[in-house]
Amino acid sequence: MKILIIEDEPKTGDYLKQGLTESGFVTELAVNGVDGLHLALTGDFDLLVLDVMLPGLSGWQVLERLRQSGKEMPVLFLTARDEVEDRVHGLELGADDYLVKPFAFSELLARVRTLLRRGKSALEASVLRAADLELDLMRRRVTRAGSRIELTAKEFALLELLLRRQGEVLPRSMIASQVWDMNFDSDTNVIEVAIRRLRAKVDDPFEPKLIRTARGMGYVLEVPDHP
Ligand code: CA
Protein backbone atom coordinates (compact mmCIF):
# COMPACT_ATOMS: atom_id res chain seq x y z
CA MET A 1 0.00 0.00 0.00
CA LYS A 2 1.45 3.34 -1.10
CA ILE A 3 0.64 6.56 0.71
CA LEU A 4 1.43 10.07 -0.43
CA ILE A 5 1.84 12.71 2.28
CA ILE A 6 1.63 16.39 1.32
CA GLU A 7 2.72 18.45 4.32
CA ASP A 8 4.96 21.52 4.45
CA GLU A 9 5.82 21.52 8.14
CA PRO A 10 9.00 19.44 8.39
CA LYS A 11 8.24 18.14 11.87
CA THR A 12 4.75 16.90 11.04
CA GLY A 13 5.83 15.57 7.64
CA ASP A 14 8.72 13.55 9.04
CA TYR A 15 6.59 12.31 11.90
CA LEU A 16 3.90 11.09 9.49
CA LYS A 17 6.37 9.56 7.07
CA GLN A 18 8.25 7.73 9.79
CA GLY A 19 5.11 6.53 11.56
CA LEU A 20 3.42 5.26 8.41
CA THR A 21 6.60 3.60 7.16
CA GLU A 22 7.00 1.82 10.49
CA SER A 23 3.39 0.69 10.19
CA GLY A 24 4.23 -1.08 6.95
CA PHE A 25 3.25 1.44 4.27
CA VAL A 26 5.35 2.68 1.40
CA THR A 27 5.35 6.45 1.74
CA GLU A 28 6.37 9.48 -0.20
CA LEU A 29 6.49 13.03 1.17
CA ALA A 30 5.92 16.23 -0.79
CA VAL A 31 6.49 19.56 0.96
CA ASN A 32 4.38 21.84 -1.24
CA GLY A 33 1.14 21.70 -3.21
CA VAL A 34 2.68 21.80 -6.69
CA ASP A 35 5.03 18.85 -6.18
CA GLY A 36 2.35 17.03 -4.24
CA LEU A 37 -0.24 17.36 -7.00
CA HIS A 38 2.28 16.25 -9.61
CA LEU A 39 3.12 13.14 -7.61
CA ALA A 40 -0.55 12.40 -6.92
CA LEU A 41 -1.40 12.62 -10.63
CA THR A 42 1.54 10.60 -11.93
CA GLY A 43 2.17 8.12 -9.12
CA ASP A 44 0.20 5.06 -8.20
CA PHE A 45 -0.92 5.82 -4.65
CA ASP A 46 -3.63 4.11 -2.63
CA LEU A 47 -4.23 7.06 -0.33
CA LEU A 48 -3.38 10.71 0.09
CA VAL A 49 -2.77 12.48 3.42
CA LEU A 50 -3.19 16.15 2.60
CA ASP A 51 -2.45 19.24 4.66
CA VAL A 52 -4.75 22.21 3.93
CA MET A 53 -2.38 25.13 4.46
CA LEU A 54 0.37 24.63 1.90
CA PRO A 55 2.67 26.86 -0.10
CA GLY A 56 2.24 26.87 -3.89
CA LEU A 57 -1.17 25.28 -4.16
CA SER A 58 -3.42 24.96 -1.11
CA GLY A 59 -4.71 21.56 -0.05
CA TRP A 60 -8.12 22.54 -1.43
CA GLN A 61 -6.69 23.33 -4.85
CA VAL A 62 -4.76 20.08 -4.89
CA LEU A 63 -7.89 18.14 -3.99
CA GLU A 64 -10.02 19.94 -6.57
CA ARG A 65 -7.58 19.27 -9.41
CA LEU A 66 -7.11 15.71 -8.35
CA ARG A 67 -10.86 15.04 -8.47
CA GLN A 68 -11.25 16.91 -11.76
CA SER A 69 -8.66 14.63 -13.27
CA GLY A 70 -10.77 11.63 -12.26
CA LYS A 71 -8.29 10.28 -9.67
CA GLU A 72 -10.26 8.25 -7.19
CA MET A 73 -7.81 7.61 -4.37
CA PRO A 74 -9.17 8.28 -0.88
CA VAL A 75 -8.06 11.58 0.66
CA LEU A 76 -7.63 12.27 4.36
CA PHE A 77 -7.05 15.95 4.98
CA LEU A 78 -5.36 17.59 7.92
CA THR A 79 -6.62 20.91 9.13
CA ALA A 80 -5.25 23.13 11.85
CA ARG A 81 -8.46 25.09 12.06
CA ASP A 82 -11.19 23.41 13.96
CA GLU A 83 -13.95 25.04 11.95
CA VAL A 84 -17.05 23.31 10.75
CA GLU A 85 -16.99 25.30 7.50
CA ASP A 86 -13.51 24.11 6.73
CA ARG A 87 -14.45 20.48 7.18
CA VAL A 88 -17.64 20.80 5.15
CA HIS A 89 -15.67 22.45 2.35
CA GLY A 90 -13.15 19.61 2.28
CA LEU A 91 -15.80 16.92 2.18
CA GLU A 92 -17.70 18.77 -0.55
CA LEU A 93 -14.57 18.87 -2.66
CA GLY A 94 -14.36 15.11 -2.43
CA ALA A 95 -12.18 14.41 0.60
CA ASP A 96 -13.12 11.21 2.42
CA ASP A 97 -12.18 12.09 5.98
CA TYR A 98 -10.31 14.70 8.02
CA LEU A 99 -8.28 15.12 11.17
CA VAL A 100 -7.85 18.27 13.21
CA LYS A 101 -4.29 19.08 14.26
CA PRO A 102 -2.82 18.22 16.66
CA PHE A 103 -3.82 14.56 16.48
CA ALA A 104 -2.49 11.33 17.93
CA PHE A 105 -0.69 9.11 15.44
CA SER A 106 -2.81 6.14 16.51
CA GLU A 107 -5.91 8.03 15.42
CA LEU A 108 -4.43 8.85 12.04
CA LEU A 109 -3.44 5.24 11.54
CA ALA A 110 -6.96 4.05 12.39
CA ARG A 111 -8.48 6.47 9.83
CA VAL A 112 -5.97 5.47 7.18
CA ARG A 113 -6.75 1.77 7.63
CA THR A 114 -10.51 2.37 7.50
CA LEU A 115 -10.22 4.42 4.30
CA LEU A 116 -8.04 1.82 2.61
CA ARG A 117 -10.44 -0.98 3.50
CA ARG A 118 -13.48 0.98 2.38
CA GLY A 119 -11.68 2.01 -0.80
CA LYS A 120 -11.03 -1.55 -1.93
CA SER A 121 -14.27 -3.36 -1.33
CA ALA A 122 -16.77 -0.61 -2.08
CA LEU A 123 -15.12 0.88 -5.14
CA GLU A 124 -14.47 -2.33 -6.99
CA ALA A 125 -18.02 -3.53 -6.59
CA SER A 126 -19.61 -0.36 -7.82
CA VAL A 127 -17.70 0.50 -10.98
CA LEU A 128 -19.06 -0.47 -14.42
CA ARG A 129 -16.55 -0.49 -17.28
CA ALA A 130 -16.22 -0.76 -21.04
CA ALA A 131 -12.77 -0.18 -22.56
CA ASP A 132 -11.51 2.99 -20.83
CA LEU A 133 -15.00 4.22 -19.92
CA GLU A 134 -15.86 3.93 -16.22
CA LEU A 135 -19.07 4.64 -14.39
CA ASP A 136 -18.82 4.79 -10.61
CA LEU A 137 -22.22 4.14 -9.07
CA MET A 138 -21.34 5.12 -5.53
CA ARG A 139 -19.63 8.37 -6.35
CA ARG A 140 -21.94 9.09 -9.29
CA ARG A 141 -18.99 9.79 -11.52
CA VAL A 142 -18.14 8.97 -15.10
CA THR A 143 -14.63 9.05 -16.56
CA ARG A 144 -13.18 8.13 -19.91
CA ALA A 145 -9.43 7.73 -20.42
CA GLY A 146 -9.11 9.08 -16.88
CA SER A 147 -10.94 12.37 -17.56
CA ARG A 148 -14.06 13.27 -15.69
CA ILE A 149 -17.26 13.62 -17.76
CA GLU A 150 -20.25 15.57 -16.46
CA LEU A 151 -23.61 13.95 -17.20
CA THR A 152 -27.17 14.92 -16.37
CA ALA A 153 -29.12 12.53 -14.16
CA LYS A 154 -30.93 11.03 -17.19
CA GLU A 155 -27.74 10.65 -19.20
CA PHE A 156 -26.16 8.91 -16.22
CA ALA A 157 -29.11 6.53 -15.90
CA LEU A 158 -29.04 5.82 -19.64
CA LEU A 159 -25.32 5.08 -19.62
CA GLU A 160 -25.71 2.89 -16.55
CA LEU A 161 -28.38 0.83 -18.31
CA LEU A 162 -26.26 0.47 -21.48
CA LEU A 163 -23.23 -0.59 -19.44
CA ARG A 164 -25.15 -3.09 -17.33
CA ARG A 165 -26.56 -4.73 -20.46
CA GLN A 166 -23.32 -4.43 -22.42
CA GLY A 167 -23.38 -6.23 -25.77
CA GLU A 168 -27.19 -6.46 -25.85
CA VAL A 169 -29.31 -4.48 -28.27
CA LEU A 170 -31.73 -2.51 -26.11
CA PRO A 171 -35.02 -1.63 -27.81
CA ARG A 172 -36.17 1.97 -27.51
CA SER A 173 -39.28 0.79 -25.69
CA MET A 174 -37.12 -0.83 -23.04
CA ILE A 175 -34.94 2.25 -22.62
CA ALA A 176 -38.05 4.42 -22.41
CA SER A 177 -39.55 2.36 -19.63
CA GLN A 178 -36.32 1.90 -17.65
CA VAL A 179 -34.85 5.38 -17.85
CA TRP A 180 -37.86 7.65 -18.36
CA ASP A 181 -40.57 5.53 -16.86
CA MET A 182 -42.72 6.15 -19.92
CA ASN A 183 -44.41 4.08 -22.62
CA PHE A 184 -43.08 3.50 -26.07
CA ASP A 185 -45.93 5.49 -27.61
CA SER A 186 -44.74 8.59 -25.84
CA ASP A 187 -42.23 10.90 -27.44
CA THR A 188 -39.38 8.57 -28.41
CA ASN A 189 -37.49 11.52 -29.84
CA VAL A 190 -36.44 12.11 -26.24
CA ILE A 191 -34.34 8.95 -26.37
CA GLU A 192 -32.64 9.88 -29.63
CA VAL A 193 -31.78 13.31 -28.30
CA ALA A 194 -30.41 11.83 -25.07
CA ILE A 195 -28.33 9.24 -26.96
CA ARG A 196 -26.91 11.98 -29.18
CA ARG A 197 -25.94 14.08 -26.14
CA LEU A 198 -24.45 11.08 -24.39
CA ARG A 199 -22.39 10.19 -27.46
CA ALA A 200 -21.15 13.75 -27.76
CA LYS A 201 -19.76 13.44 -24.24
CA VAL A 202 -18.51 9.87 -23.94
CA ASP A 203 -17.84 8.79 -27.54
CA ASP A 204 -17.17 11.65 -29.96
CA PRO A 205 -13.86 12.83 -28.46
CA PHE A 206 -12.60 9.24 -28.01
CA GLU A 207 -11.77 5.97 -29.74
CA PRO A 208 -13.11 3.39 -30.03
CA LYS A 209 -16.79 4.38 -30.33
CA LEU A 210 -18.79 2.33 -27.86
CA ILE A 211 -22.45 3.25 -28.45
CA ARG A 212 -23.84 1.83 -31.67
CA THR A 213 -27.25 2.25 -33.30
CA ALA A 214 -28.85 -1.04 -34.28
CA ARG A 215 -31.05 0.29 -37.09
CA GLY A 216 -34.73 -0.23 -36.56
CA MET A 217 -34.06 -2.00 -33.26
CA GLY A 218 -32.41 0.18 -30.67
CA TYR A 219 -28.99 0.83 -29.18
CA VAL A 220 -26.11 -1.26 -27.96
CA LEU A 221 -22.97 -0.43 -26.01
CA GLU A 222 -20.07 -2.69 -26.78
CA VAL A 223 -16.32 -2.63 -27.27
CA PRO A 224 -15.80 -3.28 -31.00
CA ASP A 225 -13.55 -6.24 -31.97
CA HIS A 226 -11.79 -4.27 -34.66
CA PRO A 227 -12.29 -0.53 -34.29
CA1 CA B 1 0.82 23.46 6.60
Image: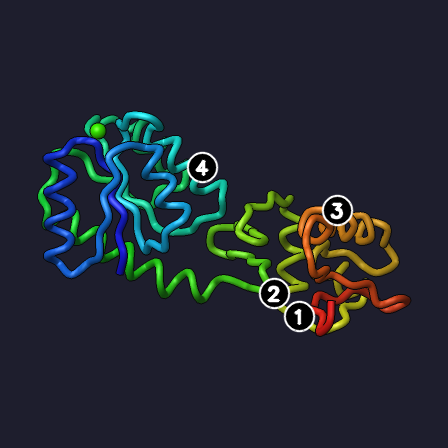
Q: Position of residue 174 (x, y in %)?
A: 76, 66
Q: Which residue is mark 1?
A: 166
Q: Amino acid at mark 2?
A: Ala
> Looking at the image, do the residues carrying marks 2 and 4 touch, with CB atoms under 8 Å apart?
no
Relative to 139, does residue 165 appear above or below in the rendering? below
The residue at the far right in this view is 216
Front one among 1 and 84: 1
- According to the picture, the residue beneath numbered tag 4 turns out to be 65
Q: Label 2 crowding class (10 Å Cα cut-off): few <14, some 14-19, many 20+?
A: some
Q: Amino acid at mark 3?
A: Arg
The residue that disc 2 covers is 130
Callout 1–callout 4 Cβ contact below 8 Å: no
Which residue was labeled with disc 3? Answer: 197
Depth check, mark 3 against mark 4: the one in front is 4
What whole-number distance in Å separates the C-alpha atoms at marks 3 and 1?
19 Å
The x, y position of residue 119, in whole percent, is: 35, 58
